[in-house]
Image (spheres, rainbow, N blue to C red):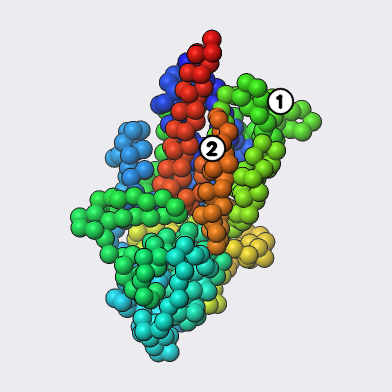
């Protein structure tokens, strides 16, 4: 096969993982060009130096029970960089109190073993207790907004005080706007199978097979061995990103906007650069690892059906405020891993992570004596919350931390990271939209899509879509080379 040319659009974790996989499949002779509009790699993953220590201000952890990141770390020689949380327990702020995060729920959906007395009122507990006896009408294959389903079956408190804070941390979205089938697919599967109540469906979804468990995120499913639930990387995600960039041996072009994509007789042509001085890049194949709005724009002419479906996927913006404190100023900080904040609480933040409690490698006595933590703000539709300057955001965060933890001292270091349109919203019908996108794209040889808009917003899911897309592109190139050889 003649040395193929592949263009990867986007240098986030999906684009870099795809470039790495393409190099492994296509060999050293392939030309792999990664085009990134910003001035750095990583997308919504970013590691900064917070008071001199590497600290993630995008995603901070990954689901360790999925296989993608451990496998990738093994390929890159980074296995010894994987760390897992300490035993510090999580908490939740609900009803004006900070209490232990209740167990026995499926992403906030109560099971029969749920212990919700610490977060619900007496009336709320009565609604939960009565749910299994109420008739349930469910049409297999249906999809509904998770919030509406929870409010109808359990009442508002379960939605606002349990499910919304749990899912808001994942999607930066409101539980009322998230589709049940895409965000809690195991619950949908249990309902499709005939569960007589939502409680019974949650029970069924949380029952794992012996010695392993079935993990589902988005539309993908994996059977994995038991073990630590979460993981992170010592040194931050930059360690993984830099290793992928190096191992891919790709030509990574930063500050390069891809303006259009068109099909040619020989493959694909990308128009890049400023509108006043556009440059053409020809490639045998293209892999798009960009947010849904960019997919819509780039595929508008080549694959209009996929573009239209991608245009229906909305994005949420958020902010991470990271802070470092002197250890002597944090005596009142609870020994927990952090706190989620219920949607009906009068606080600006939606959660706080006590990183020096949660991660051993960030503990004060393992670093420089400083205590580091991070807070997040912003849910889908809360644009006004994020349209204030950094000083006001930090002031709001400090006020909320004082209420939650009693810490009132001034931090010694602060980093404000804004994520404009950082997270796709998995609304009702998300799975149908993704299937339409992938089917329409698959009909054109040498084209594939990857990223968080598809089968899960977590880092492992992004890596999974990237590797699958790279494998489809490589297979298409091999098939095309075979046809050309026979024709010759």
Q: In terms of depth relative to the viewer, which is nearer, 333 or 337?
A: 337
Callout 2: SS: helix
Tell me whether the residue at label 1 lies in contact with that at label 2, contact meaning CB atoms closer than 8 angstroms.
Answer: no
In the rendered image of this protein, does residue 186 appear above or below residue 284? below
Hey, which quadrant is residue 235 in on the image?
A: top left
In the rendered image of this protein, does residue 151 appear above or below residue 395? below
Place of residue 61 in the rendered image (x, y in percent of width and height, measured from the top left):
40, 52
Q: In terms of depth relative to the viewer, which is nearer, 131 or 32?
A: 131
Taking the spot 48% from the left edge, 58% from the top edge, the residue there is: 182
Q: Give the residue at mark 2.
A: 442
Taking the spot 54% from the left edge, 37% from the top edge, the residue there is: 442
Hey, which quadrant is residue 338 in on the image?
A: bottom left
Relative to 399, 101 lies left or right:
left
Q: CA distance from mark 1 to mark 2?
A: 27 Å
| Residue 71 - label | none
Disc 1: CA contacts within 10 A as few (<14), some (14-19) or many (>=20): few
Relative to 212, 41 lies left or right:
right
Place of residue 365 in the rendered image (x, y in percent of width and height, measured from the top left):
31, 54
Is any atom of residue 104 visible in this view?
A: yes
Q: Give the residue at mark 1.
A: 279
Disc 2: CA contacts within 10 A as few (<14), some (14-19) or many (>=20): some
Taking the spot 63% from the left edge, 65% from the top edge, the residue there is: 381
Q: Earlier in the sequence, mark 1 or mark 2?
A: 1
Taking the spot 41% from the left edge, 47% from the top edge, the residue there is: 460
* Quarter of the picture holding the C terminus: top right
Place of residue 136 in the rendered image (x, y in percent of width and height, measured from the top left):
43, 78
Is any atom of residue 334 visible in this view?
A: no
Hey, which quadrant is residue 85 in on the image?
A: bottom left
| Comparing labels 1 and 2, the label whose residue is closer to the camera | 2
In the rendered image of this protein, does residue 487 appear above or below residue 78? above
Q: In terms of depth relative to the viewer, which is nearer, 146 or 350?
A: 146
Place of residue 301 in the rendered image (x, y in percent of width and height, measured from the top left):
70, 38
């Amino acid at each position: 096969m003649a040395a193929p040319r592949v263009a990867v659009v986007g240098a986030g974790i999906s684009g870099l993982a795809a470039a790495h996989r393409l190099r492994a499949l296509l060999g050293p002779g392939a030309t792999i060009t990664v085009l990134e509009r910003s001035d750095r790699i990583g997308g919504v993953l970013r590691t900064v130096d917070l008071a001199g220590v590497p600290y993630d201000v995008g995603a901070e952890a990954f689901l360790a029970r999925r296989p993608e990141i451990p496998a990738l770390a093994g390929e890159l020689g980074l296995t010894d960089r994987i760390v897992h949380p300490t035993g510090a327990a999580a908490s939740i702020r609900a009803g004006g109190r900070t209490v232990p995060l209740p167990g026995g729920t499926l992403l906030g959906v109560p099971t029969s073993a749920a212990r919700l007395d610490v977060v619900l009122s007496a009336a709320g507990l009565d609604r939960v207790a009565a749910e299994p006896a109420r008739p349930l009408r469910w049409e297999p294959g249906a999809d509904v907004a998770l919030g509406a389903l929870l409010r109808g079956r359990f009442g508002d408190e379960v939605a606002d005080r349990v499910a919304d804070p749990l899912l808001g941390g994942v999607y930066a979205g409101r539980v009322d706007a998230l589709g049940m089938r895409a965000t809690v697919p195991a619950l949908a599967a249990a309902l499709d199978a005939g569960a007589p109540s939502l409680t019974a469906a949650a029970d069924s979804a949380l029952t794992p097979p012996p010695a392993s468990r079935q993990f589902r995120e988005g539309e993908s499913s994996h059977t994995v061995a038991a073990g630590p639930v979460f993981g992170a990387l010592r040194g931050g995600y930059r360690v993984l990103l830099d290793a992928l960039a190096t191992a891919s041996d790709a030509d990574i072009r930063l500050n390069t906007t891809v303006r259009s994509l068109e099909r040619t007789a020989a493959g694909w042509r990308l128009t890049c650069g400023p509108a006043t001085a556009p440059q053409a890049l020809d490639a045998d194949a293209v892999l798009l690892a960009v947010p849904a709005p960019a997919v819509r724009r780039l595929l508008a002419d080549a694959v209009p059906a996929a573009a239209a479906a991608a245009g229906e996927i909305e994005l949420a913006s958020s902010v991470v405020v990271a802070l470092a404190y002197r250890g002597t100023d944090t005596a009142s900080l609870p020994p927990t891993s952090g706190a989620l904040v219920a949607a009906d609480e009068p606080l600006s933040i939606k959660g706080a992570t006590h990183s020096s409690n949660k991660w051993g490698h960030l503990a004060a006595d393992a670093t420089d004596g400083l205590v580091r933590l991070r807070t997040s703000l912003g849910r889908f539709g809360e644009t006004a919350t994020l349209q204030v300057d950094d000083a006001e955001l930090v002031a709001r965060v400090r006020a909320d931390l004082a209420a939650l933890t009693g810490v009132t001292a001034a931090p010694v270091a602060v980093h404000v990271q804004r994520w404009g349109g950082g997270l796709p919203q998995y609304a009702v019908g998300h799975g149908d939209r993704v299937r339409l996108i992938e089917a329409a794209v698959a009909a054109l040889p040498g084209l594939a899509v990857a990223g968080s808009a598809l089968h899960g917003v977590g880092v492992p899911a992004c890596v999974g879509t990237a590797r699958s897309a790279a494998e489809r592109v490589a297979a298409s190139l091999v098939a095309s080379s075979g046809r050309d050889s026979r024709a010759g």
